[in-house]
Image (cartoon, helix red, strand yellow):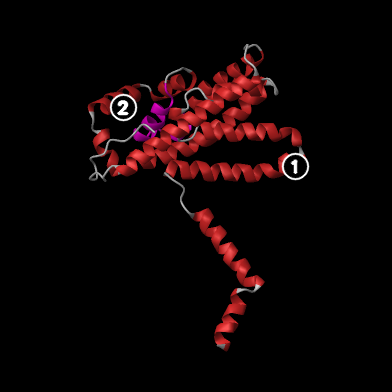
């Protein structure tokens, strides 16, 4: 009985409780969150938030730009295929408060940051054995052949035009196109696009509240679609390796 009482006292001591809390926090931080893409984006966003604490405290006027940077990382992450028009209203709203050039520079910094992560995370995904069947399909083979004719031009074109940019997110790592020219082409295409939408924010005949509602609606819709798709995937029986066709997400 004395031994049990002694162990109970040790477990309830402040040092023991502190060790237990630290262990729980560490386990929570190390636990994987969703897919590798989501896990990488969430961790990267957390690092950016931590680094932004002091600037926001020291210079409160930069807090808005820090928030804009976080939104940029989020909407260019794994949910971007189902958020086709969620970022432009944010750019226009930010362009009403900050100089358009500053908005574009912060936006391109966040974009390049998350696209660097996307490149490596998508490369790990497309080289998975479950993608073997998709890589051998006629559609993917013809698309890869078209991309390999001029990869820099394809990335640049998708970066500024209405063409879906998520396609080159898959094609670049799938064809082992180097990350450096991939990011340069993204910069050359995205930078003028970001500046354009930030600059027209003052002349678009929509209130900031309406722009915010558009963004929130698109984000909620995208999350709902992704959650519904995830639930359906969990309900389906596991397919043999190499027989699953990947989702564009």
View extreme (front): residue: 1
Q: Quadrant of residue 51?
A: top right
Residue 51 drawn in magenta: no
Q: Give the x, y percent position of residue 247.
A: 34, 34
Q: Secondary structure at mark 2?
A: helix
In the rendered structure, find residue 183 and report the number of the disc placed on it. Answer: none
Q: Nearer the viewer, residue 80 or 212?
A: 212
In the rendered structure, find residue 57 and report the number of the disc placed on it. Answer: 1
Q: Nearer the viewer, mark 1 or mark 2?
A: 1
The disc, 1 or 2, on the residue closer to the chain's N-terminal end is 1
**Mark 1 vs mark 2, CA separation in Å:** 48 Å
The answer to whether 17 is drawn above or below residue 34 in the figure is: below
Judging by the rendered image, the residue that carries numbered circle 2 is: 144
Q: Is residue 203 left or right of residue 121?
A: right
Q: Which residues are magenta?
A: 164-182
The answer to whether 23 is drawn above or below residue 62 in the figure is: below
Q: Quadrant of residue 193?
A: top right
Q: Give the x, y percent position of residue 84.
A: 47, 24
Secondary structure, magenta segment, majority class: helix
Q: Give the x, y percent position of residue 8.
A: 58, 78
**Which residue lies at the image location 26% right of the left edge and 45% below the top edge?**
237
**Which residue lies at the image location 54% right of the left edge and 36% below the top edge?**
113
Assess whether mark 2 and mark 1 are in contact (beta carbons under 8 angstroms): no
The answer to whether 21 is drawn above or below residue 66 in the figure is: below
Q: Residue 90: tell me if it is visible.
A: no
**Which residue lies at the image location 28% right of the left edge and 43% below the top edge?**
129
The answer to whether 192 is drawn above or below residue 111 in the figure is: above
Q: Quadrant of the C terminus?
A: top left
Q: Nearer the viewer, residue 80 or 199?
A: 80
Q: Quadrant of the N terminus?
A: bottom right
Q: Secondary structure at mark 1?
A: helix
């Amino acid at each position: 009985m004395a031994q049990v009482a002694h162990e109970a006292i040790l477990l309830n001591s402040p040092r023991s409780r502190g060790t237990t809390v630290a262990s729980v926090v560490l386990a929570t931080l190390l636990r994987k969150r969703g897919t590798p893409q989501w896990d990488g984006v969430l961790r990267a966003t957390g690092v950016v938030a931590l680094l932004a604490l002091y600037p926001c405290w020291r210079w409160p006027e930069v807090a808005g730009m820090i928030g804009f940077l976080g939104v940029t990382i989020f909407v260019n992450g794994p949910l971007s295929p189902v958020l086709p028009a969620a970022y432009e209203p944010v750019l226009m709203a930010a362009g009403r408060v900050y100089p358009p050039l500053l908005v574009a520079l912060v936006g391109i910094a966040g974009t390049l940051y998350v696209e660097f992560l996307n490149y490596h995370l998508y490369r790990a995904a497309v080289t998975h054995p479950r993608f073997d069947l998709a890589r051998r399909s006629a559609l993917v083979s013809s698309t890869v052949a078209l991309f390999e004719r001029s990869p820099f031009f394809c990335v640049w074109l998708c970066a500024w035009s209405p063409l879906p940019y998520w396609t080159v997110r898959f094609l670049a790592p799938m064809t082992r196109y180097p990350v450096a020219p991939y990011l340069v082409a993204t910069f050359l295409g995205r930078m003028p696009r970001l500046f354009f939408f930030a600059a027209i924010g003052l002349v678009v005949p929509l209130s900031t509240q309406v722009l915010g509602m558009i963004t929130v609606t698109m984000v909620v819709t995208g999350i709902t679609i992704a959650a519904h798709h995830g639930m359906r995937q969990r309900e389906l029986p596991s397919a043999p390796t190499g027989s699953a066709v990947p989702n564009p997400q």
